[in-house]
Amino acid sequence: MDNFPSPSRFIKRFLPRGLFGRSLIINVAPIVLLLGILSYVFFEINVDTTTRALARDVATDVALLVALEDSTPTLERDGLRALSARQLRYRLSFHDGAKVSPPAGPLGTTIDVALDETIAQQIGPGRHFVTGRLGSDFDIKVDVKDGVLEIVVPRDRVTVSQPDIFIAWMLGSSLLLLGIAVIFLRNQVRPIERLARAADAFGKGRTVPDFKPYGAAEVRRAAQAFITMRERIERHVSQRTEMLAGVSHDLKTPLTRMKLALAMMPASRDIDQLGADVVEMEHMLDDYLAFARGEGGEEAGLADLVELVHDTAAAAARARQAPDVQITAPAVLPVSVKRAALRRCLANLLDNAIKHGRKVAVTLRRDERWAEIVVEDNGPGIPEERREEAFRPFHRLDEGRNLQSGGSGLGLAIARDIARAHGGDVVLDDSALGGLKATVRIPV
């Protein structure tokens, strides 16, 4: 029993996922249900009851005409038929010496069945008759004492109206109401879709300058709340960036003086070590500021990821004096990104790969939703249970592969922060080269 889905989950498979589709069902379902009930009431109750009542009147007239044919002398029948035809609005004709032929097949409609059953009750079981259609009218043939009496009854004497006209009006009005509902719902859903696109673009670090609240009052409030939130975040990022730019200037100034003083001193082992410490402090300060700033001041723009990867890989190889990085990529791969921020993300990943592996490969690929940059090496790798730990800021692994050896412990943290600021992520996995595989996913 546990293998079968619950009814609610089974129904959800066939329900639309969008607000427009679900709202349309909410509006259409009651209309369809109402039409079904009205159709049942009209055809099964109203039409059937009214048709049988009218059929009884016609059957009574038929029984009277048959009785008159049987009881009236032959010479007087023609005048009696003419009088009956004028009074009852029937077309009457007599077939001398004829007999009623049995019906060729089953009766077609509810009206035919009702008329046939009612006539049989009125004229009795011992007399043969047959009902049929003559155009839109009803043709009734009944055995009389010396022939067959044919009675053509107008349609309006048997049924109240044309059912197909009722169906046409019902379907026409339903389609008209459905069209109005679709237009109205589309206008109501469009502001929500626009708000969702604006929030998604802002989450990917892209500007949304032309977004304005419109639509229903509730949607306007949600849009205004989004604008207020966006302004607060942008103001916070701007203030933090300006503050950190000042901190960077204030801290780098004494470091520059220290580097200058060390350069003026006589060369010695202690001086060289102190100079290396100053360079490392400067590098760590750059990492701290980049992590805290998060590249928040840069605007997203269209960039070719292939060119960006080639430039970054060449610079990383030159900095580490390592062999060239093997790159597999299409001719071009344009994506809207923060170019400098993504370059720093790739530089951190490539620096780690070159530092711990003798062979480094980069692969670029794209599908309908994502552009992926895969950086692989043949180094010692990171155990699976410690991969998320490697992304923790200021954290350095104590054993195995030390991704930030001699650094600040922010390389992977900065890379993931930049990728997530674009609406993507950085994930670690085993590489086919034997080491670590880092995959940067950016939405396209």
Image: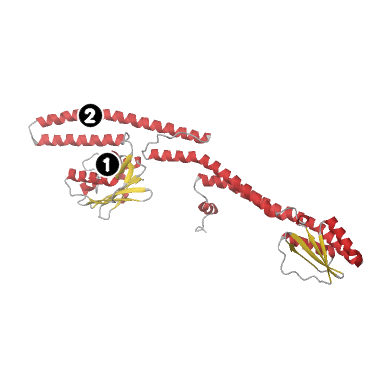
Asked if residue 414 is positioned above or below residue 67 in the image, the reply reads: above
Of 113 and 342, which appears nearest the observer?
113
Q: Is residue 133 above or below residue 435?
A: below
Q: Residue at x 21, y 30 (%)?
A: 252
Please tell me which residue lies in front, 322 or 104. 104
**Residue under circle 1?**
343
Spot occupied by residue 218 in the image (x, y as percentages of width and height): 52, 35
Mark nearest the camera among 2 and 1 is: 1
The amino acid pointed to by label 2 is Leu
Q: Is residue 293 visible?
A: yes
Question: From the image, which quarter does the C terminus lie in?
Answer: top left
Dot 1: what SS? helix
Residue underneath mark 2: 251
168 in relation to 242, above or below: below
For marks 2 and 1, the one nearer the N-term is 2
Element under disc 2 = helix
Position of residue 95 measured from the top left corner of the image (x, y, whole percent): 82, 68
Task: Tell me which residue sits at (8%, 35%) in the image.
Answer: 268
Residue at the spot 71% in from the left edge and 67% down from the top edge: 106
Instruction: Kindly indicate the quadrant of the structure image that contains residue 233.
Output: top left
What is the C-alpha distance between the residues marked 2 and 1? 25 Å
Farthest-out residue, left: 266
Q: Is residue 278 above or below residue 377?
A: above
Image coordinates for residue 172, horizontal then vertical, percent: 62, 49
Q: Nearer the viewer, residue 3 or 441?
A: 441
Is 397 on the left-hand or right-hand side of 31?
left
Residue 385 is left or right of residue 407, and the answer is right
Quarter of the view holding residue 276:
top left
Q: Which mark is residue 116?
A: none
